[in-house]
Amino acid sequence: SPSSFPTNASYVASTMATNWATELFGPKILTKPKTTGLPTESRLGGKSGKKLVALYFSASWCPPCKGFSPMLLDFHNSCKDDLDIVFV
């Protein structure tokens, strides 16, 4: 519930700095369909070595999304050591 959220800004900032990915996505994140997932912190958090994480809101039925997704994949492949993309 919202009333259980900490209100101390420095606490929130330090928590988000250390485990923001887990706070946002939960303890595991799927990297492939029909899998049990990987620990979120090791895939997206500070331990991953990624400098950027992008959230991509897309729909498989959406014509503009269908056109953009291949371009996004090409971009990701050009900088995949620094960038991870979460498809939502």
Image (spheres, helix red, strand yellow):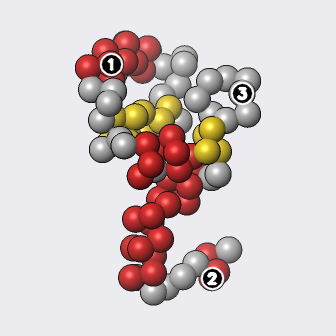
Crowding at label 3, few (<14), some or many (≥20) Cα neighbours within 10 Å?
few
Quarter that holds the N terminus: bottom right
According to the picture, the residue beneath numbered tag 1 turns out to be 77
Left or right, residue 38 beside residue 55: right
Question: Going from the N terminus, do you reach mark 2 or mark 3 first?
Answer: 2
In space, the residues marked 3 and 1 are separated at their CA atoms by 23 Å
The residue at the point 49 percent across, 60 percent down is 19
Which mark lies nearer to you, 2 or 3?
Answer: 3
Q: Is residue 55 visible?
A: yes
According to the picture, the residue beneath numbered tag 2 turns out to be 3
The disc labelled 3 sits on which kind of residue? Thr
Nearer to the camera, 15 or 25: 15
Left or right, residue 76 beside residue 16: left
Determine which quarter of the picture holds residue 8.
Answer: bottom left
Is disc 3 placed on a helix, strand or loop?
loop
Is disc 2 placed on a helix, strand or loop?
helix
* Residue 72 in the image, given as x and y percentages of width and height: 34, 21
According to the picture, the residue beneath numbered tag 3 turns out to be 35
Q: Are marks 2 and 1 in contact (CB under 8 Å)?
A: no
Determine which quarter of the picture holds residue 22.
Answer: bottom right
Left or right, residue 42 beside residue 67: right
Crowding at label 2, few (<14), some or many (≥20) Cα neighbours within 10 Å?
few
Is disc 1 placed on a helix, strand or loop?
helix
